[in-house]
Image (cartoon, grey):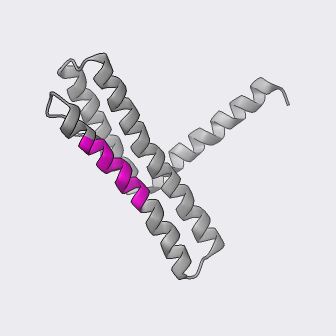
Amino acid sequence: MSFLLSRIHSFRHAFRGWHYALRTQKNAWIHSLAATLVFIFAFWLRVPPRDWAVLILTIAMVFAAEFMNTAIEAVVDLASPDRHPLAKIGKDVGAAAVLVAASGCDLDRIINSRSALICAN
């Protein structure tokens, strides 16, 4: 398989994962709605480029954490279909990663923004 063709397949898998997360995870929809509103307000308030960079990075961090949490949950469900204390820990720690990312995003907006924007979470 050529290098270019293998890259196309990789992107196809990534977009399938993105679609799966948006289709199955309610919090991914909440993050998407909040991110859309933040982008609209940032555009309306004419946020400077440096703040755009921080906004994009922090929102991306929240989505990355949410997608990793979704992957962790799927793998745990596959490996341990029955309830198990270690499976619960894995899922709880994945959820904590999303909480940390979203909280960091909020704190950044509260501390560093001249506007009253809240971050997407």
Of the 4 image quadrants, the one containing the N terminus is top right
> Can the viewer see residue 22 in this picture?
no
Majority SS type along the magenta span: helix
Q: Say above or below: 120 vs 41.
A: below
Residue 35 on the magenta segment: no
On the rendered structure, is 25 left or right of 73? left
Is 104 covered by the magenta stretch? yes
Q: Residue at the location (60% across, 77% down)?
A: 81
The image position of residue 117, as x and y in percent, is 19, 34
User: 85 above or below 70?
Assistant: below
Percent x, y of residue 8: 70, 30
Identify the residue at horizontal 36%, vertical 25% (top origin).
Answer: 53
Q: Is residue 12 something one can see in this rendering?
A: yes
Residue 10 in percent (x, y) is at 68, 36
- The single residue placed furthest to the right in the displayed view is 1
Q: Is residue 73 above or below residue 60?
A: below
In this view of the protein, which residue sits in the foreground, 78 or 51? 51
Left or right side of 29 for 83: right
Q: Is residue 26 left or right of residue 19?
A: left
Highlighted magenta segment, given as a residue range:
96-107
**Residue at position x 23%, y 20% in the image:** 47
